[in-house]
Amino acid sequence: MKRMLSALSASAAMALALSGSAMAAEWYPYPVDVWDPPFNMDSPRSAADYEPLDKAAQKWDICISFPHMKDAYWLGVDYGITEEAKRLGVKANVVEAGGYTELNTQISQIEDCVSAGADAVIIGAISFDGLNNLVAEVAGKGIPVIDVINGMSSDKLSAKSLVSFGEMGAKAGEFLAGKHPAGGEAAKVAWFPGPAGAGWVEAGNAGFQGAIKGSAVELVDTKYGDTGKEAQAKLVEDTLEAYPDLDYIVGTAVTAEAVVPILRARGLTDQVKIVSYYYTPGVDQGISRGQILAAPTDSTVIQGRIAVDQAVRILEGKDYLKHVGPKLYVVTQENHGEFDPSSTLAPDGFRPVFSVE
C-alpha cells in the first residue's frame, strides 16, 4: 500500500508529459484519484500515484464483460485489460454483449464465465442497477467483482476502476461555459449523452447540464441513443433539420466522430462546432485536424489496466484501492501536442483481443 500511495500530490501534467513509448512499456506510476469512503462518487478524494504488482503469484482466470466492442473507446479498454493480463501473467476471457440494449445477453455471458471457472469478474456494465442481482450472486460464491468504466450501484462489488462521468460531462460543459459565460455571446447547443439508463450517461448528463447552468449556453435539445455510429448519425441529422441555427453539437465520442462528415456535407463546418465528453482515436484525429474543439480524457487504457491489477490483488489477499480512477484532464487543440495517446487509445492497427492464455 505504501508503494501504491507513494506520492499524494501527483498531477495530470505527468500523464501529459510521458512519452507514448515510455507509457506503453511502463505505464506506472500513474496519477489517480482515490475515493474514501469507496463506491460513492460524492466521497472525499485524495491524489495518489498508482503502481501495480510486478507479477501475479499464479495464473488466475479473469472474466471480462463489455457492453460491446463497436467503437474505439471499448477497444482501448480491451487493449488495457489484455495487455495488463499479459504483463501480470494471468488469463483473460473477454466477452461483449453487442450493445446497450443487450442486458440479458451480458448477464448470461457473465453466468457462463463463472460456470466455466472464472476466479474474478470485471464488468463494464450495460445498466447501473440491472446487474445487481447477478453481482450479489457472483460475490456470494466468493468471486471478486470489479466495476470498470461505466458504474454499478451494487454494494457487493469488490472494487471500482472508474472515473466520475458526471465530471466528464461537467468538463465538457465548463469548456463551453468558459467560451460563453453569463452575459456573453449566446450559444445554441444540442447534447447527445448516450444510451438512456446507462449509469455513465445519467451521470454525464447531470454533470454537463449542471456546468452550463447560469452561462450563456442555451441547451435546445437532448437526444439519447445507442453509441453505434449509425444511431448517432441519425440523431444528429434529425437535430440539424430541427435547429438550423445551432452553434454546437456536444456528446459522446461516437457523436463527435459522426458529426464531422455530416457538417462537411451540409456546408456547416464553420457554423457548428463539436465537443466530445470522452476520448477516442477519431476524437483525437478530429482535434489534431481542427475539426473538434476539445474532449476530456479519462485515460481509458489505464482504467482497464488498474481493474486487472485490482482483481489480482484481491485474489492474492494483498492491499488494494477499492475505488480509484485516473485524473481527468481536457485535451484541446492548444495542448494536443502534449497528449500521450497510450494512456487512452489502443495502438494503430490494434484489433480486439478476446483471450489471453
Image: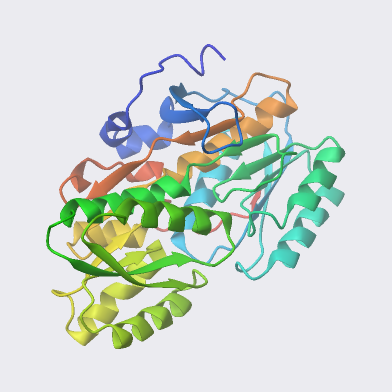
Relative to the observer, which residue lies in front, 70 or 44?
A: 44
Tell me if 129 is positioned left or right of 271 in this view: right
Q: Residue at x 40, y 49 (%)?
A: 168
Q: Residue at x 43, y 75 (%)?
A: 232
Residue 102, image quadrant: bottom right
Q: Residue at x 38, y 69 (%)?
A: 255
* Quadrant (top left, top right, bottom left, bottom right) of the C terminus: top right
Total numbered badges shown on the rendered structure: 0
- Mark yes or no: residue 324 visible: yes
- Residue 165 lies, in percent from the top left, at 46, 49
Relative to the observer, which residue lies in front, 184 or 4?
A: 184
Tell me if 6 is positioned left or right of 152 in this view: left
- Residue 136 lies, in percent from the top left, at 81, 44
Tell me if 67 is positioned left or right of 134 in this view: left
Q: Residue at x 15, y 75 (%)?
A: 271
Relative to the observer, which residue lies in front, 186 or 64?
A: 186
